[in-house]
Image: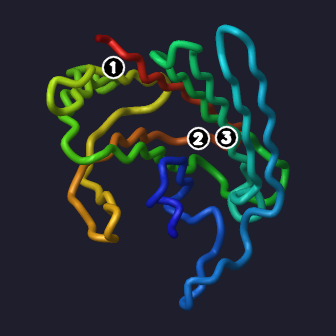
């Protein structure tokens, strides 16, 4: 249930919503916004929440764009100052993309991209980011029976000043 267990942004190593010892949810996300646009060329979804506003002074906004042929997924993550109390100085962030088991990952030397090969002759996808540093870490996938299976995740990391920060990323089917 932790924020880090999902493919989303984590700010200052904190959950966007408190999780009590019994697993119930506490204070955190109060306002969620969602807007969707469709055209012949793309589907676009813009979502935002205030789960970090009170403690850290930022709203998290994510824009996702999917091409009509499904070969291109682009995202932009924005940390927008809310004017509420928050930390002074830079705040660390991490955005995670948990991958299915068996995907082969080949990061590039510049720390900005990786090639992802789907098993059994499946397609190759290119992942690229801008405004964050790309890393690869171990993760777990929970299968249909509830059993954890080792896998990997793409991890984008960086810091945001009090004035906010945005970074972008893209999955593109190369072949």
Dots 1 and 2: beta carbons under 8 Å?
A: no
Tell me the tag on residue 126: 1
Q: Looking at the image, is 13 positioned above or below residue 37? A: below
Give the quadrant of residue 86: bottom right
SS class, disc 1: strand
Q: Decide which of tag 2 and tag 3 comes sooner along the chain.
A: 3
Dot 3 corresponds to which residue? 79
Crowding at label 3, few (<14), some or many (≥20) Cα neighbours within 10 Å?
Answer: many
Q: Residue at x 73, y 33 (%)?
A: 46
Q: Looking at the image, is 80 positioned above or below residue 66? A: below
SS class, disc 2: strand
Instruction: Tell which tag, 3 or 1, sits nearer the viewer.
Output: 1
Closer-to-camera residue (153/163): 153
Give the quadrant of residue 22: bottom right
Q: Residue at x 56, y 54 (%)?
A: 11
Q: Quadrant of the C terminus?
A: top left
Q: Decide which of tag 1 and tag 2 comes sooner along the chain.
A: 1
SS class, disc 3: strand
- Distance of label 2 from label 3 (alpha carbons): 8 Å
Give the quadrant of residue 18: bottom right
Judged from this view, the residue extending furthest toward the left is: 120
Q: Does residue 160 appear left or right of residue 134 in this picture?
A: right
Q: Residue at x 65, y 15 (%)?
A: 42
Crowding at label 1, few (<14), some or many (≥20) Cα neighbours within 10 Å?
Answer: some
Dot 2 corresponds to which residue? 160
Q: Position of residue 141 (x, y in %)?
A: 31, 58
Q: Position of residue 12 (x, y in %)?
A: 53, 57
Q: Residue at x 65, y 68 (%)?
A: 17
Q: Looking at the image, is 86 positioned above or below residue 119? A: below
Tell me the tag on residue 99: none
Dots 2 and 3: beta carbons under 8 Å?
A: yes
């Amino acid at each position: 249930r932790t924020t880090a267990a999902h493919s989303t942004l984590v700010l200052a190593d904190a959950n966007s919503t408190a999780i009590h010892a019994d697993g119930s949810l506490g204070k955190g996300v109060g306002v969620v916004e969602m807007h969707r646009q469709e055209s012949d060329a793309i589907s676009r979804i813009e979502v935002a929440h205030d789960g970090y506003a009170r403690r850290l002074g930022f709203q998290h906004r994510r824009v996702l764009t999917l091409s009509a042929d499904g070969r291109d997924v682009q995202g932009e993550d924005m940390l927008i100052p809310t004017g509420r109390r928050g930390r002074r100085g830079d705040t660390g962030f991490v955005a995670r993309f948990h991958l299915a088991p068996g995907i082969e990952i080949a990061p590039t030397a510049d720390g900005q991209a990786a090639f992802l090969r789907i098993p059994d002759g499946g397609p190759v996808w290119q992942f690229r980011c801008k405004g964050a540093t790309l890393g690869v870490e171990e993760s777990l996938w929970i299968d249909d029976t509830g059993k954890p299976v080792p896998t990997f995740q793409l991890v984008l990391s960086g810091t945001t000043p009090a004035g906010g920060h945005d970074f972008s990323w893209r999955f593109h089917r190369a072949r």
